[in-house]
Amino acid sequence: MQFPAEPFKIKVVESIRMTTIEERTELLKEAGNNLFSIPAETIFIDLLTDSGTSAMSDRQWAGMMTGDEAYAGSRSFFKFEKTVRDITGFKHVIPTHQGRVAENLLFSLIANENTVIPSNSHFDTTRANIEFHKGTALDLVVDEAYQPELELPFKGNIDLNKLKKVIGEYGKNRIPVCMLTITNNSGGGQPVSMENIREVSKLLKEAGIPLFLDACRFAENAWFIKTREKGYESVPVTQIARELFSYADGCTMSAKKDGLVNIGGFLALNDTELARQITNYLILIEGFPTYGGLAGRDLEAISIGLMEAQDENYLSYRTSQVRYLADLLTEAGISVIRPAGGHAVYLDARKFYPHLKPEQFPGQVLVTELYRHFGIRSVEVGSLMFGKTNPETGEMILPRLDLVRLAIPRRVYTTMHMNYVAEGLKELFKNRAKAKGLRISYEAPVLRHFTARLEEIV
Ligand code: F0G
């Protein structure tokens, strides 16, 4: 079946309220056209992120009740540790309260002003944690990743020639680790192939450099390997996951994605000495090694969620739901990154509003209009998030693409919700010529998109 029905029935519901266009216009004014400043209660469908927004299953909720809250040696920790070991094969499992803490722990110990850390594409928090320690974060994704409409199965792959060059230039003394983000969030949620992981691992082994996976969406990546890579059609996803981790020396994980929980993460690795140092630092910043900033009940929910995320009926539905929305938009002539990613649909805002200049934030215009007219929240991944203003000339330095991400929370919205989003976008697309550009009236010196205020150019 091309688009399987939801493989669950709904036991608990949460009401969502539709506000009026007048209310939302007023709220946008108060928020300076920044959707991060809008009360979530006034949002009908929230596609800001797929992180920490999953619906937990009845089994996970049952697990919450049986969580062991012992400070040290909690039963829930041992279950969690066993689950993570079974999935990844890594020796040491260190719980953290979310993914960026796993990154902080790792890079606090291995990154400094001499280090260069390559990846297909670093996620913002990974890059920020490397740069905070004065290291250099390099994105070496294949060039095809920058061609939104090019339909290829593994646009998240790292470019092996670029990687060889970087290894040749800096060598093992300056590269403490190479990362691979699966799936590649910053590049449209595109997967990495098993062949690419295998070859990256081989190259790194020859050079004596460890490989770490940023594994937040490992199950979605494994599903794409099963459905798109020759030879894996009949291999169970759990086995694919195990194989892909087998090529790595460790991973960082935000369980808020493929752990199907609202909070949690971990770091897992084979290097005993590094694990010891990280654990000591963990005690300083997160907590004792058998809870790492989480409650015992959270550890229970993660253990169960990690297994449910590898259920093939779930993964088939999950990726199909994202593809369903992408296909509806493509059919309507709206330009999106193809093929659809694992967790989100990315709209090409420069194509949506060709009359707006990139300096006028076409992505943010689309985000505000989608909320104003339909109560839908999305997020701009473009000139506002990544652009910079030259303080001397006032000139804007712009990124290659202006995208709008519609991230789909896991098991939260139904197909009819997807239809509603598509209908809304089609309506906006029909009236696109009326849209006006935006300009910044306030911006913070770093990570400006979270707090910037924008006004309409009249
Ligand atoms: N790595 C990737 C690939 C991510 O997408 C995220 C979070 C993190 C690391 C950090 O994990 O939030 O648990 O600290 N991504 C969210 C998003 C925020 O909206 O894409 P965290």
Image (cartoon, helix red, strand yellow):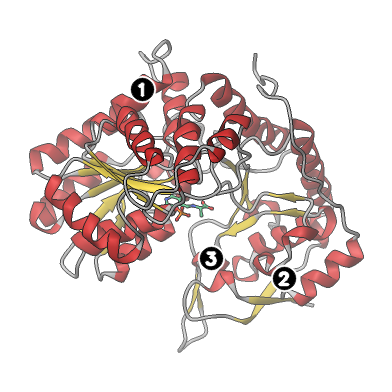
Q: Decide if residue 355 is in sight here.
A: no
The correct choice, above or below, for 389 with respect to 23 in the image is below
The x and y percentages for residue 244 are 31, 29
Cα distance in 3D space between marks 3 and 2: 14 Å
Cα distance in 3D space between marks 1 and 2: 43 Å
Q: Earlier in the sequence, mark 3 or mark 2?
A: 2
Name the residue furthest bottom: 392
The x and y percentages for residue 257 are 50, 43
In the displayed structure, does residue 280 sit left or right of residue 432?
A: left
Q: Label 3, on which residue?
A: 385
Dot 1 falls on a residue whose secondary structure is: helix
Q: Earlier in the sequence, mark 1 or mark 2?
A: 2
Of marks 1 and 2, the one in the foreground: 1
Q: Earlier in the sequence, mark 1 or mark 3?
A: 1
Q: Label 1, on which residue?
A: 240
Local crowd at mark 3 within 10 Å, few (<14), some, or many (≥20)?
many
In the displayed structure, does residue 179 sit left or right of residue 150?
A: left
Q: Label 2, on which residue?
A: 33
Amino acid type, label 2: Asn
Q: Quadrant of the N terminus?
A: top right
Name the residue furthest top: 234
Local crowd at mark 2 within 10 Å, few (<14), some, or many (≥20)?
many
In the displayed structure, does residue 135 sit left or right of residue 3?
A: left
The correct choice, above or below, for 152 with respect to 127 in the image is above
